Amino acid sequence: MTERETGGRGASETGDPLLLTPGPLTTSASVKRAMLHDWGSRDRTFLEMNERVLARIAAMANAADTHACVPMQGSGTFAVEAMIGTMVPRDGKLLVLVNGAYGTRAARICARIGRAVVTLETPEDTPPDLAALERCLAEDAAITHVLAVQCETTSGILNPVEEIATLVADAGRALLIDAMSAFGALPLDAGEVPFQALAASSNKCLEGVPGLGFVLCVREALAAAAGNAPSLALDLADQQAALEKTGQYRFTPPIHVIAALDQAIAEHAAEGGVTGRGARYAENCRVLVDGMRARGFETLLPDELQAPIIVTFRMPVDPAFDFTRFYDGLAARGYLIYPGKLTVAESFRIGCIGRLDRADMEGALAAVDAVLAEMGVTSVTA
Ligand SMILES: *Cc1c(COP(=O)(O)O)cnc(C)c1O
């Protein structure tokens, strides 16, 4: 028996603990190895790599003909802030559909950069209220844009972006999507789901390393947005204009991150693209949820609302269960989980994404058994 089978130790291909988290995530050894070089930012090899990466990202959403793929240095939030600041005009107004921390953050960004913003909130375990959205759009003519989060990573809930997109388009408004934690694993086809802009990043379901965000923007809308952005660094129109004119970034590109992403996208394609990646995550999620339920844990969400990205479990009530000891015990065995961030319930989260497979999830479950026994927990039923 290997250590993994005994719940002994989770380890990545490079021997690091497994990250069962919402990002950064476990990456393959080959993705990390792709960074072991230096490139100049004007170097042809790098520029070709960059063009290939951006083209392949646009192709994943079937957006190559309609949308520009604009890269943005930084974590995912930098791309979201760039998307809002560039696409929502100074006299525009954004309605944010909020059912978790990332929707709340988008609304805060909007307020901070001085754009008018309203929110339509539902609890963290509840999808947006589509009838209320329709009413808001009918009643408030000032609203120009709606922002939806595809998978709200706070709970792991899958929001109905397809229905939201249809409703927003029918009301003649523009849709912005935060697809950060879903892009590359959950399908989203620009030909079927109308959106003006969509933001995601290198280090979630694409399994690259952190450091690059990107925003798919309808080309005409992006051109019309020149001069909107309240920030120079986070101006997507300016970034795109420079890339088109010179092929180069305005400011230092995260070259190693882009090299790693190039390799990660090749591995994504080899796995069967969005379908193959999504299928592996769905299996990870199924093994995890079935296994945790068999041990008495309860998921926050019913299966039909659960995205195969990250799962929220309710904190067991057994006084012998101590989250810090649970976390530390799992970490000592090579499995890093994530605390909950919910207001509706005490919880913790376990991610299904990154370079993880069924055997890793089974190893994590065996580690859960070992830690529960160590704590003397007899019943985890909430
Ligand atoms: C990860 C994530 C982000 C961006 O977070 P960063 O920490 O800035 O990378 C934004 N939205 C959602 C839904 C996310 O999961």
Image (spheres, grey):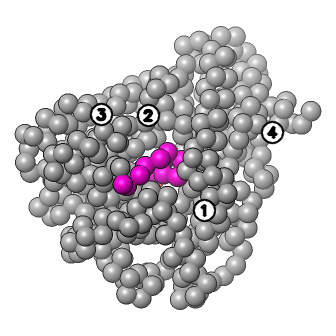
**Spatial distance from mark 3 to mark 1, Cα to Cα?**
32 Å
Which residue, given by chain and number where applicable, does mark 2 sit on? 157
Front-most of residues 184 and 125:
184
Q: Kindly report which numbered mark, 1 or 4, lies closer to the viewer in this rendering.
A: 1
Around disc 1, counting alpha carbons within 10 Å, would you say few (fewer than 14), some (14 to 19), or many (20 or more)?
many
Q: Determine whether the residue tagged by mark 4 lies in a helix, strand or loop.
A: loop
Q: Determine whether the residue tagged by mark 1 lies in a helix, strand or loop.
A: helix
Front-most of residues 239 and 188:
188
Around disc 4, counting alpha carbons within 10 Å, would you say few (fewer than 14), some (14 to 19), or many (20 or more)?
many
Q: Name the residue rendered at 30%, 52% in the picture.
A: 194
Q: Circles 4 and 3: CB distance less than 8 Å?
A: no
Q: Kindly report which numbered mark, 2 or 4, lies closer to the viewer in this rendering.
A: 2
Q: In the rendered structure, which segment of residues is drawn in magenta? A: 180-191
Residue 186 inside the magenta-drawn segment: yes
**Spatial distance from mark 4 to mark 3, Cα to Cα?**
40 Å
Residue 299 inside the magenta-drawn segment: no
**Spatial distance from mark 1 to mark 4, Cα to Cα?**
28 Å
Looking at marks 1 and 4 on the same chain, the residue that comes earlier in the sequence is marked by 4
Front-most of residues 315 and 247:
247
Q: What residue type is labelled 3?
A: Pro
Q: Kindly report which numbered mark, 2 or 1, lies closer to the viewer in this rendering.
A: 1
Looking at marks 2 and 1 on the same chain, the residue that comes earlier in the sequence is marked by 2
Q: Residue 9 carries which label?
A: 4
